[in-house]
Image (cartoon, rainbow, N blue to C red):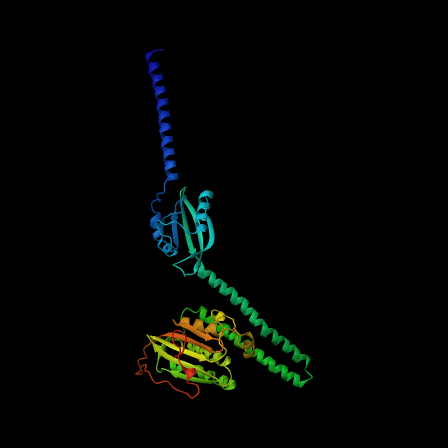
Amino acid sequence: MDTTQLALLALLVGAIIGGSVSAVIVAAMRARDRVHTETSTVIPEGVREVLHGMDDAAIVVDTSSTVLAASSPAEPFGMQEGEVLRSDELRALARLARTSEASASETLRLRRGAPPAEPRLVVARATGISPRLTLIVFRDITERERVEEMRRDFVANTSHELKTPVGAVSLLAEAIESAADDPDQVRHFAVRLGAEAARLARLTSRIMNLSRLQAADELNDDREVSVDEVVATALDAHAIQAESAGVEVVRGGDRGLFVRGDAQILGEAIGNLVANAIAYSPEGSSVGVGVRSADGIVEIAVTDRGIGIAEGDQQRIFERFYRADQARSRRTGGTGLGLAIVKHAVQRHGGEVRLWSRPGRGSTFTIRLPLVAAPEDGSKPKRRGRKKTKGAAAASRTPRSNGETE
């Protein structure tokens, strides 16, 4: 073998050895990078910036369920960097996403804020972004579920409530037809038919009013409203009811106050409270409507000395179609929507409704609205002495903030 062949052979052997060494080095480097990736807890570049720009709560956790990065909305849920997830459900969800190498989601309840804050209903979705890191995004669906539940309840309750008067109208129409030869029976059934038709009309009207209050984004007639006028309108509208029930209605408190809003809606809200107070008061008693202002708030209180409301019913009394006294509601033709309308009407005006009640002692419903200055027509809010009516002074007293009367 000559020198040239030996040189070529040596060159070939060197190339093979060099290539093998290079392959070993590359494989070693790749193995090192893979091990580093699998064991690293360094958050990939750009993840923190994305988290800080998110409106939803989101966190990145490692295999020990320690929060390494978190968005601002996650802090109220108690998820801050450096802390360990307290929820067993979240830890299990993150572990599932890591082991399955696929996204995993679950609906659960998490407390937002310190106790006694109520738990929020959230959808948590976990996705692995590395073998040791998991991204969990939370979407608060509490309000969405609440609205959906309200919609289902509203449809179910409305169909149930409408079914009763509609069925009664149908039966009474058949009764009138079968008693066509008996004028007395026809008149009797016709009176009952008219009563059921009136009940159906009241129910549909209130359903439409409540739907309008909940659906509208803005008030139709937003202006300075005289409290004296809306109270007087409400009292005049129920004067015949009070006279028929033998109940005296007394107006007391401050005069010349103004709030901002829709006079028709506010008048209907106060009228509903007055109507309820009359309906649930015994004959010969008094209903007081008191008005006062304090710390920029106007309080309109309607007080009765009727049967009162049990403590267990007070939390539900503003629900649609809920009636604390079913028998009395049937006798008075109540729809169970009056207080729901009151609550939504007052909330639309930036206020609230408070209730104080004791069984056997009566109830006080207080509407609280922001006080505004009088319109620029020369009139200004002023305080006058309360009007006293013999035998009804106690009924016109305005309740204190704790529900007791002055």
In the rendered image, the vertical position of residue 259 relative to residue 1, given as above or below: below
Residue 253 horizontal/vertical position (percent): 37, 82
- Give the image quarter of residue 234: bottom left
Q: Is residue 123 above or below residue 177?
A: above
Q: Position of residue 4 (x, y in %)?
A: 33, 14
Could you say which is closer to the camera, residue 154 or residue 291?
291
Towards the viewer: 235 or 374: 235
Residue at 42%, 53% in the rendered image = 138
Locate the C terminus by quadrant: bottom left
Residue 265 in sight from this viewpoint: no
163 to the left or right of 286:
right
Q: Nearer the viewer, residue 173 or 47?
A: 47
Percent across and percent down for residue 172 are: 63, 78
In the image, residue 293 above or below residue 119: below
User: Where residue 402 appears, x then y in whole percent?
Assistant: 39, 73
At 35% from the left and 24% from the top, the residue drawn is: 18
Asked if residue 302 can be seen in this view, the reply is yes
- Residue in front for this viewpoint, 380 or 213: 380
Looking at this rendering, what residue extends furthest in the top direction?
1
Residue drawn at x 42%, y 81% as measured from the top left: 289
Count of all numbered marks drawn on residues in the image:
0
Q: As displayed, is residue 256 above or below residue 144?
A: below
311 vs 375, left or right, is: right
Q: Please, which residue is most extreme toward the right here?
A: 181
Q: What is the quadrant of residue 144 in the picture?
A: bottom left
Rendered-image quadrant of the N terminus: top left
